[in-house]
Image (cartoon, grey):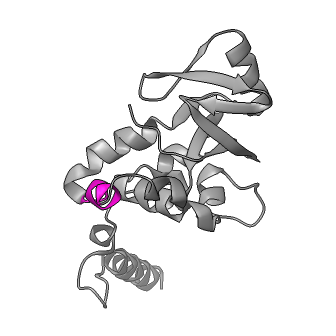
Amino acid sequence: MKSTFSRVLTLLSIVILIGGCSTSSQTGETESAAVTHPLGQASVSDDVSDANILQVAIGSEAHSTLVAAVQAAQIEHVLVNAGPLTVFAPTNDAFAKLPEGTVEDLLKPENKSTLATVLTRHAAPGSFNPDALKKEAQKGRKLYMATGDYLEVTTEGDDVFINGIKVVASIQTSNGIINVIEEVILL
């Protein structure tokens, strides 16, 4: 009886092991080959946690071009890290202000590195809502961006500008701040 049980257990283990290595019936590829790039924490979703920067951007119709660019550059994981992180998020209208064909060209796979640099220039380590940005401007400090660039922060009355671009809204997220801007930051 004991040897029969051992054989059944061994056979069951082999079936499970082989089943775990099966191919996808729709594509004929192994399941791991079907993933184009690892999303890491960007693929985690739940209905309990507060939304992170990426989740808020995905939920904003005004930022669909930004989300498409983040996905094309394959940097989703950056926007879901623990942070804090401040993202200056250009709207779809901001991308539309770029010269004709610029967005389409940046979204091409061969321009992924350039696109990632452009997008990373919109992120600053730390948490900078408009009040914090005003304090930086009063101190004459420039804001350090994730690319290593320093961008000027200025104010005019109650308005805050990053490199001359107006911050029109600010949204707190679970891992930082989204500051909505009216133009794409280019150097």
Residue nearer the viewer, 71 or 103: 103
Quarter of the image for residue 47 reads bottom right
In the image, residue 121 sits, relative to residue 43, either above or below, namely above
Q: Position of residue 155 (x, y in %)?
A: 70, 25
Left or right placement of residue 93 versus residue 35 in this view: right
Q: Position of residue 176 (x, y in %)?
A: 68, 39
Q: How many marks?
A: 0
Residue 23 seen in render: yes
Q: Main secondary structure of the magenta part?
A: helix
On whether residue 107 falls in the magenta region, the answer is yes
Left or right placement of residue 162 versus residue 128 in this view: left
In the image, residue 4 sits, relative to residue 141, either above or below, namely below
What residue is at 36 percent from the left and 38 percent from the top?
A: 117
Residue 175 seen in render: no
Left or right placement of residue 81 versus residue 52 in this view: left
Q: Which residues are magenta?
A: 101-108
What residue is at 47 percent from the left and 79 percent from the top?
A: 2
What residue is at 31 percent from the left and 90 percent from the top?
A: 26
Quarter of the image for residue 63 reads bottom right
The residue furthest front is 156
Residue nearer the viewer, 162 or 7: 162
